[in-house]
Amino acid sequence: MRQNIKITKKDLKQDKFTSAMFLGKDYFLENWIIFAGGLAAIFLVVFGIVYMQSQSQESDYRAGEIYNRAMGQFLNNEYGQAIVDFQMILSEYSSSEYAEQAAFNLANTHFAKKDYPIAQQAFEDYLNKFGDDPFFTTSAISGVAACIASSASTMDAVERYNQVGDKYRKAAEEFPEFKPSAKYYVNAMKYYAMAGNIEAAAEVYSILSEQHENTQYFRDASLIAGEYSIPQ
């Protein structure tokens, strides 16, 4: 005689859990490539991030070595070798933390060699690519001014001196709270005066009077004003 087997709710729950486990196992076995691929993708992403960070650190370290070597060459007046190394940083390590300084000092090196047109272009290249650091930015703008003032040019002297004055004034006004701005104003005033542009020179003198009255810069400006009969 067949016995009736009574299945309780507890047995049903256990049976469902067991079935789910087997189904899960079957699903995993059928789709293991997908799971493995997902894990591999996660691994590759993590590995890629770590690898990129490692490569970036190594790149910065190598760029730092070349930069220090280039600066040593610059200080020893070995300008040709310094130029090669500064350019190497810009071409091979352009994303390193030394790229901005290399671009600026490349221009400085050309200026030290008295290659003024090349130096001017290098300063302008720096300003086009970087230009957010107060020291380097204002120094680069004043570098352009110095290149224009120093280069042998067929440009009329009055036009050239006015351009130099404009550049020095821009250097002063780019970051007005930066300390060297007063010095750049004095240079601007001097070149405006040399160009005979008394109106522009007087404007700059007025700025120095308002902002830097009790400084050596204003006293220097007063001497220029007296020399060129600029209204005080």
Image (tube, grey):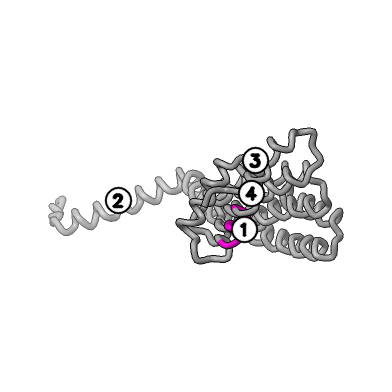
**Lower position in the chain sequence, tag 1 or tag 2:** 2
Give the residue at x 67% y 57%: 98
**Lower position in the chain sequence, tag 1 or tag 4:** 1
Give the residue at x 46% y 44%: 31
The residue where tag 1 is placed is 223
- Which amino acid does the dot numbered 1 rest on? Leu
- Which amino acid does the dot numbered 3 rest on? Gly
Q: Over which residues does the magenta segment extend?
A: 219-225
- Res 196 label: 3
Q: Check the image and report above or below for 198 versus 55.
A: above
User: Does residue 174 appear in the picture of this structure?
Assistant: no
Give the residue at x 86% y 60%: 78
Gap between marks 1 and 4, in whole Å? 9 Å
The residue where tag 2 is placed is 19
**Lower position in the chain sequence, tag 2 or tag 4:** 2
- Res 228 label: 4
Q: Nearer the viewer, mark 2 or mark 4?
A: 4
Gap between marks 1 and 2, in whole Å? 99 Å
Label 2 sits on a secondary structure element that is helix
Q: Is residue 112 left or right of residue 26?
A: right
